[in-house]
Amino acid sequence: MKVIINGEPREVSARTVFALLEELGLPPGRIVVEQNAAIVRRDAYQDAPVREGDILELVRIVGGG
Amino acid sequence: MDSGFSPEEGLRYSRQLILEKVGWPGQERLRAGRVLVVGAGGLGSAALFYLAAAGVGHLGLVDGDAVELSNLQRQILHRLADLGRRKVDSAREALTRLNPHCRVETFDLRLTAENVPGVVRGFDVVLDAGDNFPTRVALAEGCWREGKILVSAAVQDFSGHLMVIDPGRGTPCYRCLLPEPPPPDPGGPPLGILGAVAGVMGCLQAVETIKLLLGLPSDLATRLLAYDGLRSRFQVMDRLKTPECPLCGASGGNRQP
């Protein structure tokens, strides 16, 4: 299904936020997820559904300087 | 002209003095400001230069490293002639050359959970410009407990993020965003960082810090600003307070009154 991730159209198969992060190879503990302009709570990643047309912003918390 | 400023300072700061939100009262606030910057690296170099240029009266600087050749790609406070020198010495010299009106206090040490309270105590605002998670966590926890406002930025590759953490206002804390910090450096190759990206984020830290000193409100106290240099995008998103946060949550035992 088609979603928009960080402004770019993407084709993904994951049906939950957690599965999406796994599909993209991103560590869930370090990713802030905004879905259709609302922040997704970390403890909801497992259950939060990803739907066709969702607009997602994924920000990785980094530590460099 | 306000008392206590020389004609030289009036000219030096003239382009910000004409700003409605600065003026002489704002310049006084900047001069009275006490700002601690943790890390004289890529982020800290940019932030410190602009804080000194703006006339922040007292700058504290924490770094326990010496200048290496691989630093110069992004750590613009230091020069080729500074190789091998303590970073705090090299940085203090660069900042004093730029603006001798700033007092620069140096801490040639690595921050730990034990020494954070003593270092941050004398400052109004603290900038997290470090280069590793253990230092960031120790600083964020210490600042939260001491009630110090923290302006935290970090970078990797072409990306960076920035937030303001204000314990006095009970904003979300650093641990709300990072409940399980990654383990200390596993010893792999160093992370890549484009120098100019560290400069972007360090400059943004300076802007937010100057706003705090001027008493201007910041959206970033409850939000996270993310910069993606590859896609040329800025994103601002809400931060959530985690009820079970180990630092500021109901069971954390470290809540600010």
Image (cartoon, coloured by chain):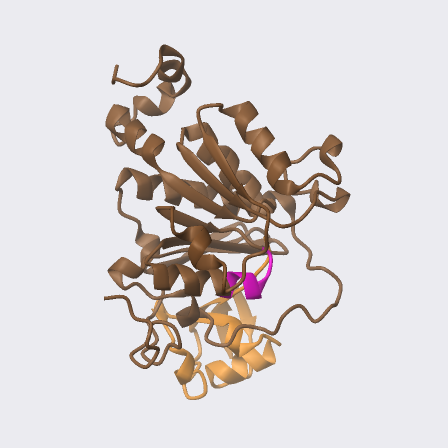
Chain colours: A orange, B brown
Magenta segment range?
Answer: B131-137
Residue B171 visible in rendering? yes
Residue B37, horizontal then vertical, whole percent: 49, 46
Residue A7 visible in rendering? no
User: Which residue corresponds to the image point at 40% horizontal and 28% vertical from the top-left?
Assistant: B55
Residue B56, horizontal then vertical, whole percent: 40, 33
Counting every numbered tag in the picture gives 0
Q: Is residue B189 positioned above or below B16 on the image?
A: below
Q: Is residue B213 positioned above or below A26 on the image?
A: above
Residue B116, horizontal then vertical, whole percent: 47, 58
User: Which residue corresponds to the image point at 51% horizontal and 79% vertical from the top-left?
Assistant: A1
Q: Looking at the image, which is closer to me, B115 or B176?
A: B115
Residue A15, horizontal then vertical, whole percent: 48, 86
Residue B32 painted magenta: no
User: Which residue corresponds to the image point at 54% horizontal and 41% vertical from the top-left?
Assistant: B106
Q: Is residue B23 positioned above or below A2 on the image?
A: above
Q: Is residue B218 positioned above or below B88 on the image?
A: below
Q: Looking at the image, which is closer to me, A31 or B34?
A: B34
